[in-house]
Image (tube, rainbow, N blue to C red):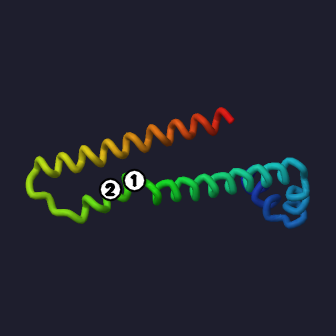
Amino acid sequence: MLARLLYNLLNNLHVVEKLADSRPIRRAAQITAYAITKAQIAGRDASARVMRSQTLRQVRQEAGKVPDDLGEMGGRLRRVKDTFVNEVKEGWKDGSRQIKK
């Protein structure tokens, strides 16, 4: 019964317009729009960093080569891992510096 009453209220155009004009609903919409915008900006920044990433370039380069033996493959993977770890450390430091500002 309660669900049906709620359903009827939310499908009433007048009630929906009144809710949309209320301060709490408008504020919730503003906060949601702000969060979505910030997430989009952060996503673009992250994707730009990935595209500039030395690790990504190195993986592409190494993927194009066929290894002669297992030892060579292990060396390649080790170099990619080291590059990745260095980039994560640099990103962590940059993030810490931005938080401090």
Q: Nearer the viewer, residue 60 or 16?
A: 60
Q: CA distance from mark 2 to mark 1?
A: 6 Å
Question: Disc 2 marks which residue?
Answer: 58
Q: Position of residue 84 (x, y in %)?
A: 37, 45
Identify residue type, mark 1. Answer: Gln
Question: Disc 1 marks which residue?
Answer: 54
Image quarter for residue 44? bottom right
Tag 2 and tag 1, C-beta contact below 8 Å? yes
The extreme top residue here reads 100
Q: Describe residue 84's horizontal placement relative to residue 98 as left or right.
A: left
Quarter occupied by the C terminus: top right
Local SS, label 2: helix
Identify residue type, mark 2. Answer: Gln
Q: Position of residue 2 (x, y in %)?
A: 75, 50
Question: Residue at point 35% right, 45% down?
Answer: 83
Up the image or down, 65 lies above or below 6; here it is below
